[in-house]
Image: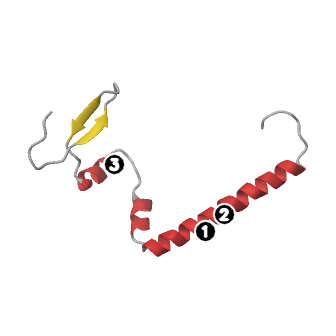
Amino acid sequence: MSALPGTKTQNIAGKDGVLQQREPMNPNDALEEARRAGFDLSLLESNLALTPQERALRHESALELMLALREAGRAHAKLAPSSGTLR
């Protein structure tokens, strides 16, 4: 496949692993295709409605929660009797 002059193509790996070229998809077409495939884009849309600073604050809050949960899990593992089996 040869690209038309002035157009950009993307290299992608096909199902067989062979490198192929294709024209970039229009972002609106990609969103519509994702909706038809059953993707819920509401989270993406709500996050994009936030300012970059608001998104960074939400990320920081989620990271703090994840770190606290990890620490709680480690503390629980130290207190729990070891049975030698996976739960």
Q: Residue furthest top?
A: 16
Q: Is residue 59 left or right of residue 27?
A: right
Please tell me the numbered disc located at residue 61: 1
Q: Quadrant of the N terminus?
A: top left
Q: Residue at (29%, 31%) from the top-left corner?
A: 19
Residue 69 percent coordinates (x, y): 72, 58
Residue 50 percent coordinates (x, y): 43, 72
Report if the CB atoms under discs 2 and 1 are less than 8 Å apart: yes
Q: Is residue 16 above or below residue 39?
A: above
Q: Is residue 66 left or right of residue 9?
A: right
Q: Is residue 35 above or below residue 15?
A: below
Residue nearest the observer in this picture, 51 or 3: 3
- For disc 3, the marked residue is 34
Q: Amino acid at mark 2?
A: Leu
- Cα distance in 3D space between marks 2 and 3: 30 Å
Q: Residue at (89%, 40%) from the top-left corner?
A: 82
Q: Is residue 80 left or right of residue 10?
A: right
Element class at badge 3:
helix
Q: Amino acid at mark 1?
A: Ser
